[in-house]
Image (spheres, rainbow, N blue to C red):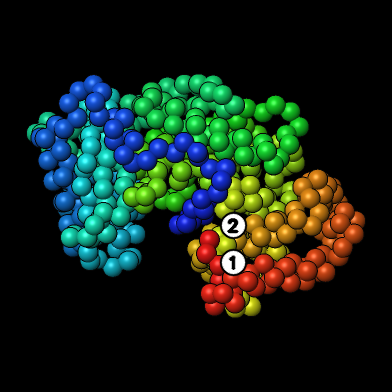
């Protein structure tokens, strides 16, 4: 499953990450004070009514009432919201998240972007923030919406620093922030992977689900198109697809890890076709560069003697989304954790030059054990045993101190 980033709930705070990530308060103050009066009470109240109707419909499992809150003109949007409903149905109906608009921003064509606080259920304090778009109706009500492809119009390309943004006018209000995230991500990738030539990646920004079919699901924030050698798809900040973020986190930070992960795939593909190397190497490298080790999951697996081989991790990464194999999302996430730690161990022992040497040798030999022995001087099975011992070792301190694993 190259390209898709598995949902990760914890975002490590590594030192290379956005130094200038703005706080919620910065964003609020930046937006207020400019242009038109921000509090349009009638629109705010119409949005609150729509949101309450939506939460109420989800609580009661009332499909018709839910659909009545959705703008029906965009077929992809209709389908996505149908998926939201089905997902809720699977979890069982009951208390639903509650949304409150805290700020509005006018968008083209009568749309309005609403910045929302999300409480897990009524009466509870907000835990997350998100931004949704609403379309104004002639009767003064609003519907939860995404603009259609026709309304988005033509894409534009804007070179900014070391990257190029491919975007719609719709996203004019967020491209500077995306460019900042993209440049932090690309600088990180370039600091670890030496590119054969000057590459300027294109970040294709997608404010809606219909804008690109390459971004699927509710937890895929970025994807690399294998073989493109230059394009990473990214969900727009402040779009439904970008999802909610914890109150204490910024949307900018949320996008940094997936974007770094996918840009690593791009760099990898430029050096050596990504489909020619084992999944634990390609995904492991992407997670290694993004500093997204999923340490807690891995430590628990190691502590309970459930550590898999890297071959097993590759198999789960490859087949994880195939329902017939029966792997869960947790299995897939744990396989990524194995891949990132396997890559880290390889890097510490042999270095990145040998990593590429192994990748190249295997790409031409197609005989893994032989290539591994030739390039590293160690047999693949000995390497596996050494990696198991290393894994036990790196968590030993935390295990004795806390009894169960190390924090992420
Ligand atoms: Zn990946």
Measuring from the top left, give residue 396's x and y in whole percent. Answer: 65, 73
Q: Is mark 2 within 8 Å of ligand 1?
A: no
Measuring from the top left, give residue 30's x and y in whole percent. Answer: 31, 30
Which residue in the protein does label 2 denote?
293
Horizontal relation, residue 144 to residue 278: left or right: left
As helix, strand or loop, the secondary structure at mark 1 comes to: helix
Whether residue 31 is visible, yes or no, is: yes
Measuring from the top left, give residue 336's x and y in whole percent. Answer: 60, 59
**Measuring 59% from the left and 77% from the top, which residue is drawn there?**
400
Whether residue 333 is visible, yes or no, is: no
Badge 1 crowding class, 10 Å Cα cut-off, few under 14, some 14 to 19, many 20 or more, is many
Pointers 1 and 2 in contact (C-beta within 8 Å):
yes
The one nearer the camera, 210 or 44, is: 44
Measuring from the top left, give residue 268's x and y in whole percent. Answer: 69, 42
Asked which quadrant contains residue 189, the reply is top right
As helix, strand or loop, the secondary structure at mark 2 comes to: loop
Badge 2 crowding class, 10 Å Cα cut-off, few under 14, some 14 to 19, many 20 or more, is many
**Measuring 44% from the left and 51% from the top, which residue is drawn there?**
219
- For residue 65, the mark is none
Asked which quadrant contains residue 47, the reply is top left
In this view, the residue farthest toward the front is: 401
**Measuring 60% from the left and 61% from the top, which residue is drawn there?**
337
The one nearer the camera, 67 or 29, is: 29
Which residue in the protein does label 1 denote?
298
């Amino acid at each position: 499953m190259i390209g898709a980033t598995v949902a990760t709930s914890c975002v490590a705070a590594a030192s290379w990450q956005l130094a200038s990530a703005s706080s919620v308060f910065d964003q609020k103050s930046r937006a207020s004070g400019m242009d038109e009066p921000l509090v349009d009470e009638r629109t705010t109240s119409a949005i609150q009514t729509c949101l309450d109707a939506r939460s109420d419909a989800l609580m009661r499992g009332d499909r018709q009432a839910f659909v009545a809150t959705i703008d029906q003109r965009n077929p992809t949007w209709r389908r996505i919201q149908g998926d939201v409903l089905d997902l809720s149905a699977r979890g069982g109906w009951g208390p639903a998240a509650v949304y409150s608009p805290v700020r509005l921003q006018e968008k083209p064509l009568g749309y309005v972007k609403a910045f929302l606080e999300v409480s897990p259920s009524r009466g509870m304090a907000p835990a997350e923030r998100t931004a949704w778009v609403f379309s104004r109706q002639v009767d003064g009500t609003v519907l939860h919406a995404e603009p259609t492809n026709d309304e988005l119009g033509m894409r534009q390309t804007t070179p900014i620093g070391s990257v190029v943004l491919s975007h719609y006018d719709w996203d004019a209000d967020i491209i500077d922030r995306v460019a900042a995230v993209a440049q932090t991500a690309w600088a990180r990738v370039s600091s670890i992977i030496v590119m054969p030539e000057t590459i300027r990646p294109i970040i294709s920004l997608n404010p809606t689900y219909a804008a690109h079919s390459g971004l699927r699901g509710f937890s895929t924030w970025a994807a690399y198109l294998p073989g493109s050698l230059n394009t990473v798809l990214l969900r727009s900040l402040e779009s439904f697809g970008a999802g909610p973020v914890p109150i204490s986190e910024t949307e900018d930070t949320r996008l940094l890890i997936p974007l770094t992960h996918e840009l690593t795939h791009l760099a990898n593909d430029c050096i050596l076709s990504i489909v020619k190397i084992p999944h634990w190497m390609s995904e492991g490298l992407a997670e290694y560069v993004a500093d997204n080790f999923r340490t807690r999951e891995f430590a628990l697996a190691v502590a309970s003697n459930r550590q898999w081989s890297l071959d097993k991790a590759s198999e789960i990464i490859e087949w994880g989304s195939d329902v017939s194999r029966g792997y869960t999302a947790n299995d897939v996430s744990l396989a990524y954790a194995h891949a990132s730690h396997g890559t880290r161990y390889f890097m510490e022992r042999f270095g990145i030059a040998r990593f590429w040497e192994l990748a190249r040798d295997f790409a031409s030999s197609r005989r893994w054990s032989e290539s591994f022995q030739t390039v590293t001087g160690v047999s693949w099975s000995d390497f596996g045993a050494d990696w198991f011992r290393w894994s036990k070792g790196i968590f030993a301190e935390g295990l004795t101190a806390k009894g169960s694993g190390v924090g992420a």
